Image (cartoon, helix red, strand yellow):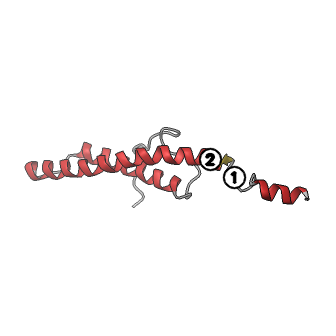
Amino acid sequence: MSTMERTAHSGKDDDNIAGQPLRVRLLYALGVCVLGYFTFNALVLLGVVQFIYTAVNKSKNEEIALFSRNLLRYLGEVLAFILFLSDTPPFPFAPFPGNEPDID
């Protein structure tokens, strides 16, 4: 068996994505998946709180809106990592998304 065939059978080349072993990426993905689940539920709760606040005060709470925007960016980073659209693991392995200006 040639060296190339042994490498193909061992899976070592296929097991490395962006310098990370696939097993390590799986562990990262599972961890951030759990965080993404809680983030999604927090966003739904913040939506309800913002709705009630707006109904009572006739204006939205800017701090809730800003925090929600940052959580939404984080959830996007989580999904991008899980779907292999990004090779950078999100928070807590990278900085939490801040108050960057909106793209739209």
Horizontally, is 98 left or right of 12 in the view?
Answer: left
Specify few, some or many for label 1: CA neighbours under 10 Å numbering under 14, 14-19, or 20 or more: some
**Residue 1 figure quarter:** bottom right
Look at 42% across and 43% down and name the residue there. 98
Q: Position of residue 26 (x, y in %)?
A: 57, 48
Q: Position of residue 96 (x, y in %)?
A: 45, 41
Q: Identify which residue, 63 or 86, lies in the foreground.
A: 86
Q: Position of residue 29 (x, y in %)?
A: 52, 48
Residue positioned most to the left: 56
Q: Is residue 100 in sight in this rendering?
A: no
Q: Indicate which disc, 2 or 1, sits on the residue closer to the N terminus.
A: 1
Where is mark 1, residue-wise?
A: 15
Q: Which mark is residue 23?
A: 2
Look at 82% across and 55% down and name the residue there. 7
Q: Which mark is residue 3?
A: none
Q: Identify which residue, 9 or 67, lies in the foreground.
A: 9
Look at 39% across and 44% down and name the residue there. 99
